[in-house]
Image (cartoon, coloured by chain):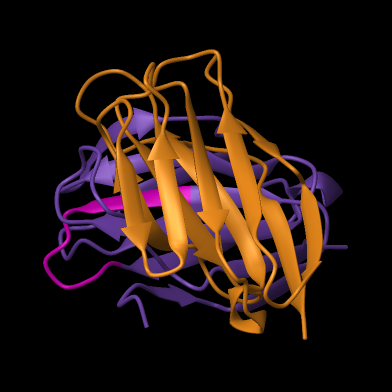
Chain colours: A orange, B purple
Amino acid sequence: TQLLEQSPQFLSIQEGENLTVYCNSSSVFSSLQWYRQEPGEGPVLLVTVVTGGEVKKLKRLTFQFGDARKDSSLHITAAQTGDTGLYLCAGAGGSGNTGKLIFGQGTTLQVKP
Amino acid sequence: DSGVTQTPKHLITATGQRVTLRCSPRSGDLSVYWYQQSLDQGLQFLIQYYNGEERAKGNILERFSAQQFPDLHSELNLSSLELGDSALYFCASSRRGSNEKLFFGSGTQLSVL
């Protein structure tokens, strides 16, 4: 069974601080996605990483895929209150040609002004 | 707005009852996915349909069933409801169905009393 473990589960920081969220597995994933979810809404895709060692930047967010494609991290620089939300990593799982995703438990981020 | 429409937004029912959740995918998307999100289990993949046919199955209970109609909308049927079925049910869609970007609806909050 493929599992994704996210850490930390909860993070409360002041505006302007940096943070890193980790997503780890013992399984190899063909790709890994990061989503952000706000209360009352569905998850929204932030980025997809495919190649081992890949680094992608989205403004103040930096995403990295581990060399072995088993882990990933999300780093936020100078967090803002608008970054508050639930961050989810998801790995493409299952065999064959499907879009089944395996999600981590999520990291709830609160950025205080 | 993701373009994925889910109805109803909230549903309150009693144990033993049966409910139907409805999802309209984004225009042109052929794949529909159903996910269940609960506090203890996180976001879990239930089932995927591609162009009317079942493509992948996850942790879906036998009391639950789904289908995708010729117009590509999908319904998730939950029967013999138990207290533990209370959760947020999300529908997502994608253009085809293989490791693609998923667009999530806003979910149906099901409360079983």
Q: Is residue A82 left or right of residue B16?
A: left
Q: Quadrant of residue B19?
A: bottom right
Q: Residue at x 30, y 58 (%)?
A: B93
Position of B80 with respect to A76 (left or right) is right
Q: Position of residue A81 (x, y in %)?
A: 67, 82
Image point (59%, 49%), residue name: B36
Q: Is residue B17 visible?
A: yes
Q: Position of residue B54 (x, y in %)?
A: 28, 36
Image point 78% across, 57% down: which residue? A11
Q: What is the x, y in percent for residue B11?
A: 68, 73
- What x and y, as percent, mark residue A45? 39, 60
Compare residues A108 and B93 and report the one nearer the observer: A108
* Magenta-drawn segment: B25-34
On the question of residue B62 being in view, the answer is no
Q: Is residue A2 left or right of residue B49?
A: right
Residue at image position (60%, 74%) is A83
For the N terminus of chain A, which image quadrant? top right
Q: Quadrant of residue B40?
A: top right
Q: Is residue B27 magenta?
A: yes
